Amino acid sequence: MQALVIVAHGSHLNPDSSAPTHRHADTIRATGAFDEVKTGFWKEEPSLREVLRTVESDEVYVVPLFVSEGYFTEQVIPRELRLSGWDVSEWDSDGLSADTATLSAKDTGQTVHYCGPVGTHEAMTDVLVRRAETVTGDPDVGEDFGLAVVGHGTERNENSAKAIEYHAERVREMGRFDEVQALYMDEEPEVDDVTDYFESEDVVVVPLFIADGFHTQEDIPEDVGLTDDYRTGYDVPSEVDGHRIWYAGAVGTEGLMADVILERAADAGAEIEAAIDTVREETRDAEATGDVALDRETGTAGD
Amino acid sequence: MTDVRDEQIEALVEQLTSGSDPIDFDGLHAAATEDGYALSTPEGGEYEGLSEADLRAAAGDGGVAPYVTNWYYWEEVVGHRGRHRRAFLRHAEAAHEQTVPERYAALEDGMRTEWGEVVVTATLGAHGERRYEIRHTDDAGVDSGPLNVDSDTPDADSEALDRYDDPLDARELATYDDRGRYRPLKSAPSLVSGWVFDDLDGRDAVETLDVFYPASVANWNREREGDLDVTHWRETAERQTGIYDIVEDLPREAVEWVAQACCVDSQCLKRREWQYEEGDDLAADGGAGAFPCREPCSLVVAAARKWTKLAEEETHTYEFELTPSEKEQIEAIIDAVADGRVDEIREADVYEGANRYRTRYLRAKRFDDKGNLSGTPTHPNEE
């Protein structure tokens, strides 16, 4: 029996934080690729300390729903899951290349394939692009468009910016968008100045965040100039300094994120190729049947 | 009522002829011997030297059939892979205390297990299959009759509750309290009522419980097996890093207040088993919940961080002008907020200190224009 456990931050204050995690788990559960699909959280339940004991399988793939390698993926999650003998050198990573490490859970005796975070996987680039398609409602969006990938910044962890740069560069190499730029909340180049960095009239702004919260629903919309007060809402697109800004909200809410989770597990040895194909197909279908409108509305919710 | 399906007898024969150990389960004894099959149950007598056809006939006998369907349910349907799941389901029909006929009789009426704010009712379906119903304890009186699991037309009372069949639907039910506020602590006694999962199999029943009360079944069973790993306050505090690193500085007496504030039954239905440290118990009541709390949760740790920072402040001596009634009123307001009673205080009940008009009057009278009580500044030296 093989199980998938998606681990994420969660929140004591806001149910939106864990909502995407649950949704992606549901998507993957529906494929039947794993005997069990569970979720565990730092701030919600089941906690990271107890999630493995809710899993009946002996073979467990643990995928962190985090943007970058750092404090949570390297220290908190392995410690709380009680992974015996964990050392970050197991990943042998340059800050972007963590893939998997196989360890034993001290608590339960299960074999745990501890995967790198979703945010640094190459498939994440496709999700950024998909997010742009979703928010514009155009499956071919790119020509005459700029794309801004927005990160929190390097305040505490330089790997955070590495992940942003990595995906911005990969989108650039696709040659699909006229311009691609990495921007940050807390450092140069800043998202506040987004219109200075683009010639294109239309710019899609995609925050590389796992869930919508005050950064993506309050700070960034105000920083970008979509609105003076997030509570009053804003349109998608919004006119800012002669540009049309298509603000996408957190990329982690995009249905295709389930694919990145599966890719991480597959890289760690899970045999789930058919599920990967299904998820790629089904999350695209969802987009054509009205999720666009739903996602756009979240841009004005702000609560 | 209990008839045995061919499939169940096939499984029995298969088990006996596969070279596995003879069957010895809940009173059913069966074996393949050189003289044929042997079969016995406490009520159904003893058979020896049976042919396969005889075995089939004997297994369908009134006194034996419940034992066979019972064996089939536990060994073939539930199985042993989910150890905690199996233990809970056995517990739900008192399998360790009652004989098969006793249980079958009790299951006809439904056997109830309270779990936090929900009640699980186990019943007997066709051919010894068990079905489980889960609802809020507040809704328990709504349907006192036996659950009609085989009917397509559930009784009218059950119709009044919103019916669900997917365990994951419990996630939505558990997210908000009855005033629409987010419930970060799933074991808070604020689960909404008005719903029912009226016809679940064993796997889905335990899955549903695990959504309402995550990891509760596993921890309960570990405790039952004498294998619960309790992590006490000191060890939890010392494990913390990052912004929670400081909680290990929280004084012992403050940990008592944390447990009093957060971990009593009025706030959390888990039964607190963690103490200050091994051999140094906290005085606060751990509660009487069905399932244990094995370590300070993330909410307690996050709150303790705030209290650790607040504990760094020195006390000051303030001088206030208050009438005796006003002092008592402030105490009444603190009690009302701490006990979550603010909404229960009636609009015009000015005899309650925490009444809104009484409180507004106190503010109008005793606060200066900067919001200072009795005009006394919080930081006099900074003025």
Image (tube, coloured by chain):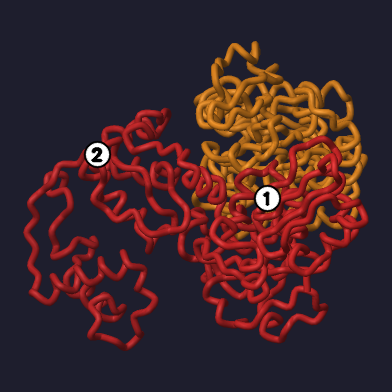
Chain colours: A orange, B red
Whole-percent x and y of residue A213? 59, 47
Relative vertical location of residue B96 with respect to residue B326 in this rendering, above or below: above
Checking the image for residue A4, the label placed there is none
Checking the image for residue B280, the label placed there is 2
Left or right position of A15 against B3? left
The residue at 85%/21% (across/down) is A173
Q: Mark 2: which amino acid?
A: Asp
Checking the image for residue B25, the label placed there is 1
Q: Mark 1: which amino acid?
A: Phe
Whole-percent x and y of residue A196? 68, 32
Q: Element at badge 2? A: loop
Q: Element at badge 1? A: strand
Q: Is residue A120 visible?
A: yes
The residue at 22%/40% (across/down) is B252
Between A199 and B351, the one lying in front of the other is B351
The chain carrying label 2 is B
Between B328 and B16, the one lying in front of the other is B16
* Count of marks placed on residues: 2
Relative vertical location of residue A35 with respect to residue B191 in this rendering, above or below: above
Left or right position of B367 against B162? left
Give the Cα separation between the discs numbered 2 and 1. Answer: 43 Å
